[in-house]
Amino acid sequence: MKQISNHTLKCVLMPTTGNTVCATPRGLIAFLENNYQEDGSIFIPEALRPIY
């Protein structure tokens, strides 16, 4: 989440708590449902593989 200060015209990152910006559990469930394979494995897309 970003906020632009009127006094300095700088972009400042604001801290968030409790996953208020992103619904993490919903995103994870959607990811698992969309990438679930018939053999029970989860397909991880190429773009996310370097993370794991």
Image: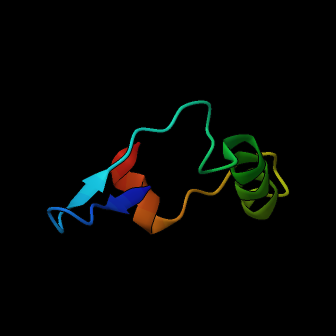
Between 35 and 9, the one nearer to me in the picture: 9
Q: Judge whether 46 appears above or below 40 on screen.
A: below
Between 9 and 13, the one nearer to me in the picture: 9
Q: Quadrant of residue 2?
A: bottom left
Position of the C terminus by quadrant: top left
Side of 43 where 35 appears, left or right: right
Position of the N terminus by quadrant: bottom left
Q: Judge whether 21 appears above or below 10 on screen.
A: above
Who's the residue at 85% across and 57% down the image? 38
Who's the residue at 77% across and 49% down the image? 26
Side of 27 where 18 appears, left or right: left
Who's the residue at 70% across and 56% down the image? 31
Who's the residue at 81% across and 45% down the image? 40
| Figure colour scheme | rainbow
In this view, the residue farthest toward the top is 18
Side of 13 where 26 appears, left or right: right
Residue 51 at x, y = what percent?
Answer: 37, 47
In this view, the residue farthest toward the front is 7
Report the label total: 0
Between 12 and 21, the one nearer to me in the picture: 12
Q: Judge whether 12 appears above or below 40 on screen.
A: below
Residue 24 at x, y = what percent?
Answer: 66, 44
Between 19 and 52, the one nearer to me in the picture: 19
